[in-house]
Amino acid sequence: MSWGTELWDQFDNLEKHTQWGIDVLEKFIKFVKERTEIELSYAKQLRNLSKKYQPKKNSKEEEEYRYTSTRAFLATLNEMNDYAGQHEVISENMTSLITGELTRYVQELKQERKSHFHDGRKAQQHIETCWKQLEASKRRFERDCKEADRAQQYFEKMDADINVTKADVEKARQQAQLRHQMAEDSKAEYSSTLQKFNSEQHDHYYTHIPNIFQKIQEMEERRIVRIGESMKTFAEVDRQVIPIIGKCLDEITKAAESIDHKNDSQLVIEAFKSGFEPPGDIDFEDFTQPMKRTVSESSLSNSRGDGKSELKFGGKSKGKLWPFIKKNKSPKQQKEPLSHRFNEFMTSKPKIHCFRSLKRGLSLKLGAGPEDFSHLPPEQRRKKLQQKVDELNKDIQKEMDQRDALTKMKDVYIKNPQMGDAASVDHRLAELGQNIEKLRLEAQKFEGWLAEVEGRLPMRNEQARRQSGLYEAQNTSAVNSCAQDRESPDGSYTEEQSQETEMKVPATDFDDEFDDEEPLPTIGTCKALYTFEGQNEGTISVAEGEMLYVIEEDKGDGWTRIRRNEDEEGYVPTSYVEVYLDKNAKGAMTYI
């Protein structure tokens, strides 16, 4: 079953059929593309849905997630996020394994089809040319035969006429012989052309066309096999993520099975239990006898133990019968805002001293302060200033490294003018010089403040004492002074004592805020392509072929920050190393 033998005369139909096959392949590619877009859109909507119902940080919703049912719902949201990720995997795999591969294959298929049909048209044009030559030779032979017959008849007529001279008869005879010779030559040419055409036609229909059609058939069969394989891949891509999707669904089921209604009920009790006893029965009071009306000892008023309220039948009771009945606030309590009461507290004369004493600690909480960090305690101020100086020194080093790199580039341009104009970097060098000078002045300013603070601080062995304890002592003394201000001349406290709340700034607030900075995590690895001698401050020397860890990418200045071990790190030119970034790096440092 070969197209070359069975379809030898269906060139045009084969051309249309193969074009239809390519259209089917392109239609399948378009179908897969739209499927990938749907998968991405679905994954995006699932992620947004999961994010929408995630609990907001520092909100009341976080408290609600202590219940097993809400924790199970949170686990479901997280699993749905992973579920969405699997649909993204489906989209990526279909794009790379089907869409991309088939798109390239279609381009190759079009080129191959174009080449085969070009060869087929060329063969057809050749056989048509041979046919035209045969027809021309045949017509020429036919014409020469007719002219030879006419010349022979004319000669015989002249020879039979007695009035014609002998010379005219001889001339007619020669003309007849010439025409007969031309007819013989045309006959020989026609015979040769016919044999050549028959040979070409045989080769055309039994050799050339079958070979071309066989190639077209093989091309079409490869296309059919390829689209079948792509459909299998289409199903396999889905099948590969089914175990992971099943695992996500299993985790959702597991989370649902972890819901404990008894535990949630107990949590409700712990959250809202008031501790009051239910009110007891009220005793009957007989007003017909002159007796003292008392309230039952089992009532809630007596259970409170204040002994100040009496129950009057038919009147208003000052006792609290039901703990869930809210007591209305007085108009003053309802209308008076909290800010007004706070201002009244701050402006009261006995408390001004307390407020001024604690103002230093409260400013830390508000996060506001002058440039020299003078609002902080001495040790914390020193840490802040040292941190600022280190940051400025790093900025200065980066600017100097850029200046050194540009200086080297300028030297190269001077030695090799064809590589670039040396004057083009002068503006940037001047700008870097100004930046370095500004940064140095800024660093000197902070170094001066740092020296001032270090001059006031005790020795390092004395600094080992808890700074928080010293600061707490200052606050404690401030509170004690407040207490003294509240005393009356005879040594007794005034009534304002019961209205104030002791304010105390914990020392741990400062300690937690200024912990030592942790080392940067590794974000990938790199391989040194060339040897680099790090002679400047902040750089590190590497040997060709050495493997190191990347802790900071190139920020556009041409330098990458790397680490050899826990103690050796620095910058190297980005062009000297080949970087392999780890997209899944979570900050864990591992050394080989």
Image: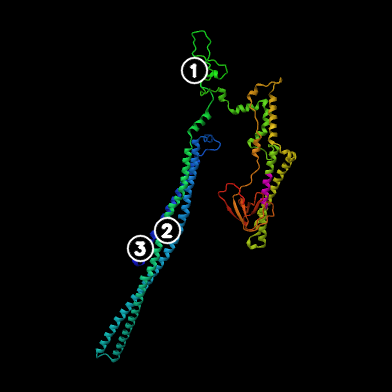
Identity of the residue drawn at 68% across and 35% down: 468
Marks 2 and 1: which is nearer the front? 1
Indicate which disc, 2 or 1, sits on the residue closer to the N terminus. 2
The residue indicated by pointer 2 is 226
Q: Is residue 408 left or right of residue 311?
A: right
Q: Tag 2: residue type?
A: Arg
User: Nearest the camera: 86 or 388?
Assistant: 86
The residue indicated by pointer 3 is 13
Image: 349 above or below 538:
above
Identity of the residue drawn at 36% across and 71% down: 206
User: Nearest the camera: 155 or 513?
Assistant: 513
Q: Residue 3 appears in which quarter of the rendering?
A: bottom left
Label 3 Cα crowd, 10 Å radius (few <14 / some 14-19 / many 20+) = few
- Give the residues drawn in magenta, as a range: 388-400
Image: 241 above or below 207:
above
User: What is the C-alpha distance between the residues marked 3 and 2?
Assistant: 22 Å
Is disc 2 placed on a helix, strand or loop?
helix
Disc on res. 281: 1
Residue 192 visible, this orientation: yes
Is disc 3 placed on a helix, strand or loop?
helix
Indicate which disc, 1 or 3, sits on the residue closer to the N terminus. 3
At which x and y percent is residue 463? 72, 38
Marks 1 and 3: which is nearer the front? 1
User: What is the C-alpha distance between the residues marked 2 and 1?
Assistant: 89 Å
| Secondary structure predominantly adopted by residues drawn in magenta | helix
Label 2 Cα crowd, 10 Å radius (few <14 / some 14-19 / many 20+) = some
Q: Is residue 230 left or right of residue 580?
A: left
